[in-house]
Amino acid sequence: MKRQLMAAAAVCALAFGAGCATTETAAEAPVEAPVETAAASALPDYPITADGATRFIADAEAKYAEVSEYVARIQWARATNITFDTMWLEAKANAEATELQVQFANQAARFNDVEVDPVVRRKLNLLRLGLVLPAPNRPGAAEELAQLTTRLDSTYSTGKFDFKGRQITLDEASLILADSRDPAETKALYEGWRTVSPVMKADYARMVEIANEGARELGFADTGALWRSGYDMPADDFAAETDRLWDQVKPFYENLHCYVRARLNAKYGDAVQPDHGPIRADLLGNMWSQQWGNIYDVVAPTTGGASSYDLTELLKAADYDPVKMVKTGEGFYTSLGLEALPQTFWERSMITRPRDREVVCHASAWDLDNADDIRIKMCTNVNGDDFYTVHHELGHNYYQRAYKNQPMLFRNGANDGFHEAIGDFVGLSALTPTYLNQIGLLQTTPGAEEDIPFLLKMALDKIAFLPFGLMVDRWRWDVFSGATTPDQYNAAWSADMLKYQGLVPPGPRPADAFDPGAKYHVPGNTPYTRYFLAHIYQFQFHRAACKQAGWTGPLHRCSIYGNTEVGQRFNAMLEMGQSRPWPEAMQAFTGETTNDASAVADYFAPLNAWLTQQNRGHQCGWSDT
Ligand code: X8Z
Ligand code: ZN
C-alpha cells in the first residue's frame, strides 16, 4: 500500500495505507508548527485536553477504518482492471482519502503540547507521520495530486514497447532478459522498456511540487523528510543509520561486483564488458539490475563444483502452475502453525495476468477490510523469481492477519521494512535445498560442496540488491529536497546508479529519458528504503529463528520449516503490529534492539572469504572511470 496511514489496502498499491505495506511509527516533532487549515477545522473541534485527544483518536480510528476499506476496494478495482472509469474513481477516492488524512494530521498536531496517555500519543504521532504524499490545503490540490498519481501508476502498468516487431509488456521483457546472453538483445530490452517513461516526467515533477507544498504545511522541510520520520527516531538520525548500515555491507558488495565483472568480462570480452570500471547494467539478468540471480550460470564457480539444480527447471519439471506455487507458499506458513488462508483469498486474489484487460502486474499483497479479506495480486510465472515473490507477498498477508486485532491505527508493520522482511525471512528457509527436498522438488540434498554455489546464488540476489535498495530513495530524497531539479532527474539517477551500484546503462541515454519512471515504485510512489532495511532485518530474523530452533550448523543451511515453536514466537512479534516502537518488536523475536548487518556477514561469511580469494590480483571498485 502506498499512502501510508491507511492500513487497509495493498502492500504495493496506491493510496491510503497502500504502497508496499504501510508503516510509520512515532517520534519527532515537525520542523515547524503546522499551519491551521480550513480542512482541519472541518472536523469537530475537540478540546485541547487529554480527554479531547482520546475522543479525537477514537473518532479518527472509526473513520479511518471505514474510509480505508472503501478506498482499498476502489484501488483493487483499478489495479485489476485499468480503464478510464476505474482511474477516475480511484483518483476521486484517493483525493478524498488524502484530504481526510491531512485533516487528521493537522488535528493530531494540535495536541503536541498536551500531556496525553502514551498509547494516544503514539496514535497522534502515527496520524502526523502517516502520509506518503500529502496534499496542501487549497481547493483542487488533492484532486490534482490524485489524478497525477493514478495516471503515473497506470502509465507504468500499461507500458509496452516494440521488440523485434512485436509490442511486449514488462513481464514478457523481463522473462527474455533473464535468459538472454546476447548483449545486443539485452541492450534493446533495457532501452526499450525505458521508452515508456519519458512521458511521465512532467507529471512526476508536478507531483513533487504539490506533495512538497503539502509536506511543508504539515511542518516538514519536504516530502523526503516526512518519509524519513517514520522510524521511531529523528529523520536525520535515520538517514545516518542507513549510511552506517551501507558502510557495514559495502565491502562485501564491492567484492561481489568485482567477481561478477571479471566473469562478465571473460564471457563477453573487453568491448562489451571491460575488466575495470562499472558493470554494464543490462548484462545482469534483471531490468533494473537489482537482483542478479538470473545470471548465476554466467558467474558459477569454475572450480570446486557448481550448483546441481536450477529452481526454475525443478518447478517446471514438477509441473507447477501459479496456483500450486501459492499453495506451496501457504504450506510453509501453515507448517509454522499459522492458519491456512481464508477461502476468499483463493476466490478473490489475482494470481495470473488476465488476458482480457490491463492490470497492475507489479506484485502486491492486500488487506481490503483490515481483517479477513486478504489477497495477493501477481502476474505469476512458474520460475524461481516468482517462487520467492509468492513467499514475500504471503508474508505481508500473514502480518496483516496477525495484527488485525490491534486498534485500527496499530494495524501495520512495526515499520515498513519489517513488513517487507517477513516473507523474505520465510523465503530464506524456503530456498534451502533441504526444504526443496522435503517438498519433493529436489530428489537429493546436496552436501557441503554446494555451499559456495548456493551462497553465490543467494548473494547475487540479496547482496546485489543492497545498493539498489538504497539508491532509489537517495534519488527521491534529493528530488524532494530540491537538490535535484527536473532537468537533472535522469543524470542524477545515472549518477546514483554509478555511485551506489557501480553500474552504467548500455549506451548514452536520450535527452528526454526519465529512467526512474521505469521502476515501479517511482511512478507508484512507494518508498523504497524499506527494502534496504528488509534485506538486513531478514537475516537478523533468520539468525534468531535458527538459534531458537537449536540449529548449530551454517546459517545458510538452516530451515525453520515445520517448526511451530519458532512460528509461535514469530507470530507474537507480528501480532504487535505497530503498537510499539520497532526496536521492541525486534527484541520480542530476536532479543536484539538494533538493525545490525552482522547477521548478513554471518550468513555469507564463507562466500565473502571465497570471493576475496577469487578477486586476488584484480583491481576492485569502479572509481577509476
Ligand atoms: O516490490 C517488491 C514486492 C512487492 S512489495 C514484489 N519488491 C521490491 C521490488 O520488486 O523492487 C520485493 C523486492 C524489492
Ligand atoms: Zn513487499
Image (cartoon, rainbow, N blue to C red):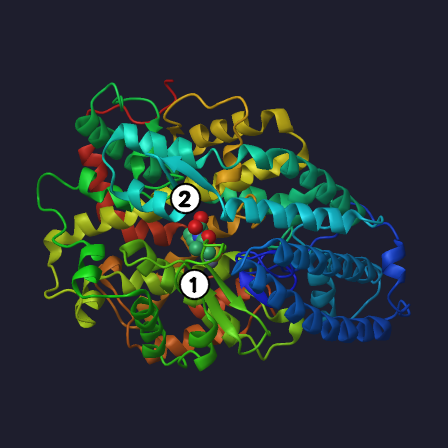
Report whether 112 appears left or right of 479. Answer: right
The reply to whether residue 425 is in sight is no
Quadrant position of residue 16:
bottom right
List x then y, in percent, for residue 338: 40, 79
Label at residue 534: none
- Using a 10 Å C-alpha cutoff, classify the residue at mark 1 as few (fewer than 14 neighbours), some (14 to 19) or many (20 or more): many
- Using a 10 Å C-alpha cutoff, classify the residue at mark 2 as few (fewer than 14 neighbours), some (14 to 19) or many (20 or more): many
Residue hosting label 2 = 466
Quadrant position of residue 97:
bottom right
The reply to whether residue 237 is in sight is yes
Question: Which residue shows up at 68% across the image and 48% down it?
Answer: 147
Q: CA distance from mark 1 to mark 2?
A: 19 Å
Q: Is residue 321 above or below residue 39?
A: below
Image quadrant holding the C terminus, namely: top left
List x then y, in percent, for residue 280: 33, 28
Classify mark 1: helix, strand or loop. Answer: helix
Q: Would you say the residues marked 1 and 2 are in contact, meaning their CB atoms lie under 8 Å apart?
A: no
List x then y, in percent, for residue 414: 55, 64
Identify residue type, mark 1.
Glu
Residue hosting label 1 = 393
List x then y, in percent, for residue 234: 65, 49
Q: Nearer the viewer, mark 1 or mark 2?
A: 1
